[in-house]
Amino acid sequence: MIRLQQIQRVFQVGEEEVHALRDVDFGADKGEYIAIMGPSGSGKSTLLNILGLLDRPDDGTYELDGIMTTDLNDKEQANVRRHKIGFVFQFFHLVPRLTAEQNVELPLVLAGVDRAERKKRVVETLEAFGIGDRVKHRPDQLSGGQRQRVAIARATIMKPTVILADEHTGNLDRSSGNDVVEILEGLNNQGITLIMVTHDPELGKRARRRIKMVDGRIEEDKKNNQA
Amino acid sequence: MQTSDIAAFSIQAATASRGRTILTLLAMAIGVSSVILLISLGDSGRRYVMDQFASLGTNLLIVIPGRSETTGGPPPLLGETPRDLTLDDAIALKQSTAIRRVAPIIAGSAPISFKQLEREMIVLGSSADLFEARRLTMGQGSFLPPGDLDRGGNFCVIGSKGKTELFGNNQALGKWLRIGDRRFRVIGVLADTGVSLGEDLGEVVIIPVATAQSLFNRVSLFRIVVEAVNEDAVGRAKKAILSIIKARHEGEDDITVITQDAVLATFDKIFRTLTLTVGGIAAISLVVAGIMIMNIMLVAISNRRSEIGLLKALGAARSQIMGLFLTESALLSTAGAFFGFILAFSAMKLLAGFFPEYNLALVPWSPFIASGLALGTGIIFGVFPARRAAMLEPALSLSRR
Ligand SMILES: Nc1ncnc2c1ncn2[C@@H]1O[C@H](COP(=O)(O)OP(=O)(O)OP(=O)(O)O)[C@@H](O)[C@H]1O
Ligand SMILES: [Mg+2]
């Protein structure tokens, strides 16, 4: 379902060229649970951004669900992001002036879904993530764990095929971090592909497949059979 | 995205930062209201002058000695007057069937006194025809009696202000006043009609033209006011005047005939140009407002970088981001223009209360000016920031908080 071939990503920093990704080949099937690990600066976030079409590789091809995304224009890429990809960020990235409900509704608003249909889906989703009693609260009135749940609700409301999470527990304490991971694993059990970047070895162990990156390359790619 | 959602999103974004929104609205409101106000004041002035002219009567022609090259324009400031206009010229004009009234005018200033009070006033020598031609109204008594133009008389008609200055609240009719060293009996007082086109007839004394000739020791006329039989006859009257005077002046075209519509057209043009110029100067304040909008949008965009990255991550294309931010600046400027319109409207109401005689009002198309200016400013100065937002790299704008 995901197929990266010969991906290169080079950043120009002043005079220097930083190779964030070098010749990365990577594939993933539907429903996989993958943890990307590795030292800081090894290119994990860059890889995730390319998978999420937030960044374009300088070279190489990326196929998602049979679509050659590297050939698409901005509008078509936006459309793929809208319908196939859900993001969960370390810093939540909730819009501060909007309520929990409105934040979750945002992807539907951008997609032009009808108001009535939107309300129904938002209420269902918020209930499912256990924040049905916080719909009118703004982000600054929510705890970190609650915020991340709102963010996950927002990432899943368009029913994406893949969820990309970048250090999504990095700003949470262990117990709310675990809650959030369990929610994501629950979604993975329903068939959504889950790819997460983490520094936490405990979390890494829970994934069925672990990838280790070093200096812009995939150094290790292990399947974990017991999980 | 549905239109109502775009509007709701932009309104929410604009009202989230109250300070910047209020400042922008203020700048925009001031710009728009000054444009509307100045244009409207100019237009009210134009209408006032036009009305004043119209109230003089549109059948009027004015004959001035001296030839002006620009036919129909105002008389030349300098230039020789080769041949004087005489009383006989004026009398000769009555031959034409296109002409109903002829009022010769001699003007000069002289000390007017009653008992120990003395005032310097304008003395007009004219005839009974002036009354109808200039649509004058009497306060008391009667105007100069009709009769032969070369017959003088020691009686006068006085303006209402001059009457008050010399006589106070006392009866003036029948009293004798002094003009220079001659004595005149007051037979009428003009009604107080206020200032009409800078010609203040309040402080004027009108005497028979022949008497004025001997008073000022001058035979040449200052001008001749001619009234055509009706509006359609004005052209014929003008031709008749030119040919009659030419015949009397040995074949020389040495007079200028001014018609009302020529003067009206000139004034109209002057006022329109003036109004547009002043409006254009006021539009500079709109550029300032526009730059404020641009600046404020740029600040907003740098504050909302991560939000823009997020919108992209959630599936917004560049064009959609651009649309959202353009809507925001257009909304700001439209709301500002709306307040500007209200401001201009109230200011005009207030001014109209202070100066009722000028009939001040906003020009009828001012709502269109306001909305046009608003959208123009909002969009012109909104495009650059909106493009900036649309081009932000999502990965980069999401990477830091
Ligand atoms: N926009 C950018 N401009 C310049 N260099 C960049 C940019 N983004 C990433 N890099 C560089 O690319 C390399 C990989 O960065 P990346 O963010 O992918 O690392 P990471 O593995 O996610 O690290 P961390 O664990 O600290 O998040 C780093 O050397 C980084 O400095
Ligand atoms: Mg990273």
Image: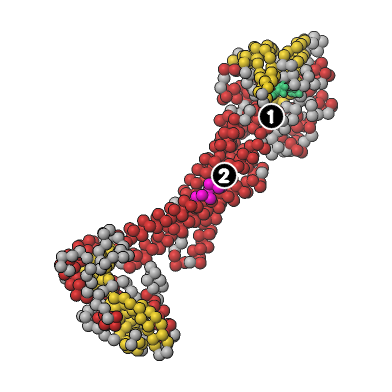
Q: Nearer the viewer, residue A174 or B285?
A: B285
Cβ(mark 2) to ligand 1 < 8 Å?
no
Let me know if residue B286 is in the magenta part. Answer: yes
Q: Residue at x 55, y 53 (%)?
A: B30
- Mark before the other along the chain sequence, 1 or 2: 2
Q: Residue at x 72, y 32 (%)?
A: B401
Residue B153 x/y as whole percent: 26, 85
The quadrant of the rendering that contains the N terminus of chain B is: top right
From the image, tell me which residue sits under label 1.
B398
Q: Residues within 10 Å of mark 2 (few under 14, many from 20)?
A: some
Cβ(mark 1) to ligand 1 < 8 Å?
no
Task: In the rendered view, tell whether residue B217 sits above or below residue B13.
Answer: below
Ligand 2 shown in quarter: top right
Determine whether, in the image, residue B98 is placed left or right of residue B193.
Answer: left
Q: How many marks?
A: 2
Looking at the rendered structure, the kind of residue marked 1 is: Leu
Residue B199 x/y as whole percent: 37, 71
* Color scheme of the displayed model: secondary structure
Mark number displayed over residue B291: 2
Q: Residues within 10 Å of mark 1 (few under 14, many from 20)?
A: many
Secondary structure found at label 1: helix
Q: Chain of mark 2?
A: B
Would you say the residues marked 1 and 2 are in contact, meaning their CB atoms lie under 8 Å apart? no
Does residue A95 appear in the picture of this structure?
yes
Does residue A186 appear in the picture of this structure?
no
Q: Are marks 1 and 2 on the same chain?
A: yes
Q: Nearer the viewer, residue A168 or A221?
A: A221
Residue B233 x/y as whole percent: 22, 63
In space, the residues marked 1 and 2 are separated at their CA atoms by 28 Å
Q: Chain of mark 1?
A: B
Q: Nearer the viewer, residue B269 or A52?
A: B269
Q: Which residues are magenta?
A: B283-289
